[in-house]
Amino acid sequence: MNKSVITEETVLQELKKAIVETLNADESSIQPESSLINDLGAESLDFLDINYRLEQAFGIKMARHFVLEHIEEMYGEGSAIDDNGQLTEKAVTLLKIRFGDKMKDLEPGMDMDEVPALVTVQSLAEGVMDILNSVPESCEKCGKSDWQAEEGVRTKCGSCGEPAVFRNGDDLIKAWLTKVQEEKKIF
C-alpha cells in the first residue's frame, strides 16, 4: 500500500546523491538496475554510509540486517545458509518472492557472499519506500491524517508539525517473513 507522501522519484534522487557522496561516482553512471558492488564499486562499509545518509535525509531507520539473517533468526540456523555458506532452496524461494525478477541470478547453492552484489539501486530504493509507506494512518500527537512532505524528503503532520514515526526496516522484514510464511508455508 502506497501511503507515503514522498515519491519514489524523490527517493531515487536522494539515493543517487548518497551514492555520489559515498562512492565519488559519476551521477550519470547510476541507473536503477546498477549493482552497488559490481557496477558502482561499493564495498560493505559503503552500504552503512549510504544507509546512514538515507536515514538522515528521510528521518527513517534502515534495516541493519539482510533478509537472510532474519530468516536464520526466525526459522533457525541453516534455514537460509547451509554449513558451507551456501543459500538453501527455501532462502532462494523467499528472496525471489521479495525481489522478483530483479534477482534472477539467485540459485540454491550460491555462495552467500555473492548475494550483496545483487543489491541494485532500485532494490535499495524499494526498501526505503517500504519504510516510508509504513507511515501511520494518523499523527500520534494530534490524531489527524494530514501527512505532508517537508522539504520534499521529511514526512510531517500538516496539522501540528510533528514528524512521522515509521517502522524500522528490520521490523518490516520480520513482518513480511511472518506474512509470507503464513501464506506459503515455506518452513
Image (cartoon, grey):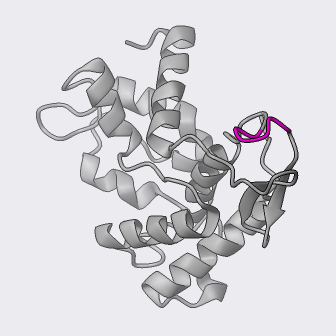
Among the 4 quarters of the image, the one containing residue 27: bottom right
Q: Quadrant of the C terminus?
A: top left
The residue shown at (65%, 66%) is: 32
The residue shown at (42%, 71%) is: 38
Horizontal side, residue 185 vs residue 77: left or right: right
Most frequent secondary structure within the magenta stretch: loop
Residue 7: % across, % down: 80, 59
Start-end of magenta stretch: 139-144
Residue 53: % across, % down: 51, 72
Between 12 and 159, the one lying in front of the other is: 159
Residue 138: % across, % down: 78, 36
Among the 4 quarters of the image, the one containing residue 31: bottom right
Residue 34: % across, % down: 56, 69
Horizontal side, residue 50 vs residue 138: left or right: left
Q: Is residue 73 above or below residue 118?
A: above
The residue shown at (39%, 60%) is: 117
Query: Looking at this rendering, what residue extends furthest in the left direction?
Result: 83
Horizontal side, residue 68 vs residue 85: left or right: right
Circle count: 0
Among the 4 quarters of the image, the one containing residue 2: top right
Q: Is residue 78 above or below residue 57?
A: above
Q: Is residue 54 magenta?
A: no
Q: Quadrant of the N terminus?
A: top right
Horizontal side, residue 165 vs residue 88: left or right: right
The residue shown at (52%, 9%) is: 182
Between 185 and 96, the one lying in front of the other is: 185
Q: Is residue 138 above or below residue 14?
A: above
